[in-house]
Amino acid sequence: MTDTADYTPPKVWTWNKPNGGEFASINRPIAGATHDKELPVGKHPLQLYSLATPNGQKVTIMLEELLALGKTGAEYDAWLIRINEGQQFGSGFVAVNPNSKIPALLDRSGPQPVRVFESGSILVYLAEKFGALLPTEPAARAECFNWLFWQMGSAPYLGGGFGHFFAYAPKKFEYAIDRFAMETKRQLDVLDRRLAETPYLGGADYTIADIAVFPWYGGLVKGWLYGDSAEFLSAHEYKNLLRWADMIAERPAVKRGRIVNRVNGNPASQLHERHDASDFDTKTQDKIAGTAS
């Protein structure tokens, strides 16, 4: 469907009607809590409040990778935040992340709890806390940060732009989809050219840059995001990016991290909350359903 009517913006925009789309019920132009709700606290020093969106997956993948490296202090409780129900606007969540976006992390390992929000900030915090997955040599560290912050700056185009207008908007507009598809394909080309030069984004080693980019652009080319968007964007053209995505998708920690706080898809790939490593074997939703039946 193409645009059917011209729109003349008013001199002053006002929020006087729902904007439509999948997230209309929770979108609003103001910050702050809408209701009182304390957050639960589990047994581990690291408390994660999240949902298995691409941004949420970054942190659970990171934590599972740290545990796989033997960093036992990275044990964590992952609590489910259902953003479609507005749980991110509870007073407890807003206290951890005043921007009311998942993921949000509370580190209770020290004398005073430390709140960490924004997925890139959480990755850096955990990498520095545990001394892993972030190079220390200055040039390699800079290259890792280059790609980490590239992702943080460009993913809003992919998630907030292309994904919204292609999959979630109540009406399809040619201009918006064409504009964001063009930019998304440019970003895929940036990655494909980089990965023609090196096995990982930061260079020879797997780092937080790969962990940040994989759930977004890896998920896109593998067909996990936005329905048939991979076909629409001709994702098969990006051979180097696909090679990298396939390699990372096979990592055991990535497989575990991708299912934590997931609430859709195959029940076998849904672990709504994670409080112990054994939960992967005992508490996925297919096992819960099987027990209930």
Image (cartoon, rainbow, N blue to C red):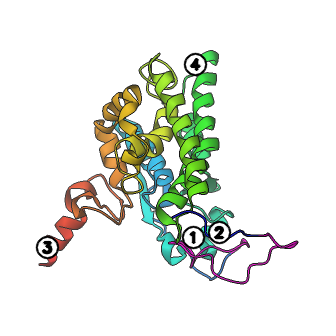
Task: Give residue 140's mark.
Answer: 4
For image coordinates 39% across by 25% down, the residue present is 240
The residue wearing badge 3 is 291
Question: Sequence order check: which comes first, mark 3 or mark 4?
Answer: 4
For image coordinates 13% across by 71% down, the residue present is 290
The answer to whether 126 appears left or right of 15 in the picture is: left
Quadrant hosting residue 106:
bottom right
Question: Sequence order check: which comes first, mark 4 or mark 2?
Answer: 2
Task: Give residue 94's mark.
Answer: 2
Tags 4 and 1 in contact by the CB under 8 Å rule?
no
The question of residue 109 being in magenta is answered with: no
Mark 4 element type: helix
The residue range painted magenta reads: 8-32
Q: Looking at the image, is mark 1 or mark 3 nearer the viewer?
A: 1
What percent of the width, then of the height, locates residue 113? 62, 57
In three-dimensional space, the C-alpha distance between marks 1 and 2, rounded to whole angstroms, equals: 7 Å
What percent of the width, then of the height, locates residue 275? 36, 59
Query: What amino acid type is highlighted by mark number 1?
Result: Gln
The residue wearing badge 1 is 88
Q: Residues within 10 Å of mark 3 (few under 14, many from 20)?
A: few
